[in-house]
Image (spheres, coloured by chain):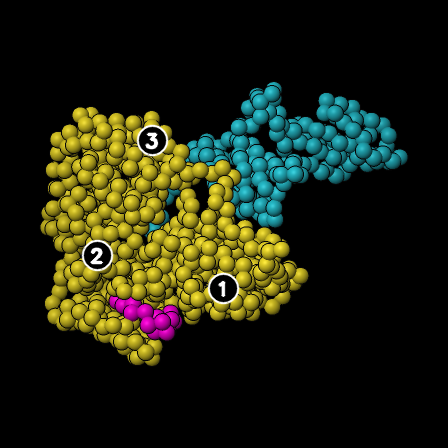
Chain colours: A yellow, B cyan
Amino acid sequence: MPKLLTGAEIVFKCLEDQKVNHIFGYPGGAVLPIYDELKNHPSIKHILVRHEQGAGHAAEGYARSSGKPGVVLVTSGPGATNVVTALTDAYMDSVPMVCISGQVPTHLIGTDAFQECDTTGITRPCTKHNWLVKDINDLSDVMHEAFKVATTGRPGPVLIDIPKDIQFAKAKYKKPKKEKSLNGKSHNKFSADEIDQLINLISKAKKPIIYSGGGVINSGPKASEALRKFVELTGFPITSTLQGLGAYPGDDNQFLGMLGMHGTYEANNAMHDCDLLINIGARFDDRITGKIDEFSPNSKKVHIDIDPSSINKIIKVDLAILGDVTKVIDKVNKTIVKKKNGNGKSNKPNIAKWWEQIQKWRSKDSLNFINSEDSIKPQHAVQRLYELTKNKDTYVTTEVGQHQMWAAQHYKFNKPNRWMTSGGLGTMGYGLPAAVGVQVAHPEKLVIDIAGEASVLMTMQEMSTAVQYNLPIKIFILNNQYMGMVRQWQELLHEKNYSESYSEALPDFMKMADAYGCKGIKADNPLELDEKIQEMVDHNGPVIFDCHVDPNENCFPMIPSGKPHNQMILGPNDQEENKIKGKGKALV
Amino acid sequence: MPKSKSAYSSPSIKQKSDTYIFVVWVDNEAGVLARVVGLFSGRGYNIESLAVAEIDAIKNISRITIVTTGTPQVIDQIRLQLTKLVPVHKVAEFKRDDKDVIFKEMALFKIVGKKNKIEKCLNACKKFNPVVLDETKSSAVIQITALRREIDKMSKKLKPLGLISTSRTGAVAMTRGAKIFN
């Protein structure tokens, strides 16, 4: 007779068989049996966070930077509700994550027991799937399926709710099955005919653009290689969503920068005027499309995505190719190479004029800003940070707001999985715990959280985690004393009524660093910025860098709400120019 | 030019909505109905009626029939989102006026009144296979099977004849001929 294992043992057996090395968690009454078992499994390291939301975001950072699912372990009731924000964030940004939550014993479920909540009910809309394990004999299968669901197709978070009595109960352990059909949901459904149609469109295009997204990152490093080859073969310009940054080198000449609400002038205008739009693993988010009726009005649209429900959800497309980005682009590349005369390089003369036009847009230099010698401009701070860290293999996370957009605009990423930011949900407080997760996955690498002072305060407690595990994360705070993006919207749309967007009583971040037991650095003079950034980078330990920046700086360029891509507000240089010419005000 | 104060774009022109019937085969497990219904409520889709029951006790399969209204784009989304749910095996969808599909609802009418009134009710229901499930001197429970709008009509018609309570199911659907959904 095979050995019977307790539920807690089965949980760890499954984690071992799923090759999990790290879990982020916080103990509590309903998960104590699992925590008790932890000591018997030296291959699995537990990172104790300070708040369950931090565990969730750390797991997200871990997953996004390593490609492996992030694993979270929390207790019932408040443990589970605290992780809901992180689950929703992972769901919106398609991050693979497995959350194990404790639950009150089965016989107490539904009785309003201590620390009970309807965890599966609460997390149903923010997970790909969740399970309440009521029978110990189901536990192994559920655990293995959870990893499968989280990591296949369009990745996302899942949750397994395990009542305390199930953690004690005994059953046989079952190894993961080799092939488990997910109700016949296969992911590569494209045909050779669809590839040919795409090649045909590519060969005819005069004003093409490639618009790549987070799907390329999720598909793995091979997808980025395939994408780079595809861009090289076609000679097409490429732009990227916020989540897709790094899939294509940010400093390459064919890269137009990020598109969307705070995207570059050239990327947005190219999207608007193009005649062929190839969407690779992006989802036509509303921050990207602007006004839908006027989105890229004259183009043939191609959408390559693994998730069938992304197709035609927002923008009707002419050709949909369902499949994993790596598989699809590899096939496209092979077909292009095979048809030597048909298209490929011979298509480049066709688009020479298009490139000329793009160069004209580019000459606007839409990311420009007026630098200052008296105060640190936030854009300048990000540029300096980039220049001083670009030769290291740096991982960057962000919080949410102006600093996030400046980081996306001015920090150039050359590799996938180096950029972790909360795009879909826009979770302030994401960056610090995410940096913890990234550093756990890559202990030797430089990990920087480009933060805002308002965001970072939301999950500041995780600094304590960083110190405990000696994770040398660098928290680079662009401190403007405002919720900057809120203030910007209030300035532009609410007649400068800065309602509640100014933080009256900010903590002294230097003392805070001291209190947490890490290094604090403060900068408010542009002349000493480089030196201080260097000091931060060189320090072997966690750092809180309080960078005092111009509080009134706005993030440009910008597509105002409800406007199409070709009606952007540009930066102060351009606004000045337009004033003199007496036109262009209509753009504001 | 009036300035929008929203960080979101304004809605574009709405397409025409139509009524569709979805048939969904799901694993009969705890929470599966909540998942399906939650998908509708969470994404702002309508449910006009819903019928669900296990149809295969060995494979543990339930069949859910949902009547909903939406633009073609929304209907497409509903189908694709339903298909994505882990316990969902397959999804079929068709327009309400599809001639190749039969769909039926059942209604129970409670009539209180004299014999002759109950007779009149039964007569009125003649077209819809009326079955008397319970009868006393002063009341009757009549079962009919019909289309939604026919049941609507009947319940209006029977009101003056002593109808005091109506109970009805959601629609269930089946294709005509030898073929099956999908």
The residue tagged 2 is A411
Locate residue A185, reporting x and y percent.
47, 38
Residue at 49%, 56% (x, y): give it: A14
The residue tagged 1 is A74
Quadrant housing residue A213: top left
Disc 3 to disc 1: CB gap under 8 Å: no
Discs 1/2, front: 1
- Could you tell me which quadrant the N terminus of chain A lies in? bottom right
Secondary structure under tag 3 reads strand
Quadrant housing residue A317: top left
Q: Is residue A61 magenta?
A: no
Could one spot residue A242 in this view of the protein?
no
Secondary structure under tag 2 reads loop
The amino acid on which the numbered mark 3 sits, given as a three-letter code, is Leu
The label on residue B166 is none
Locate residue A279, reporting x and y percent.
30, 39
Secondary structure under tag 1 reads strand
Locate residue A580, reporting x and y percent.
10, 50
The label on residue A319 is 3
The amino acid on which the numbered mark 1 sits, given as a three-letter code, is Val
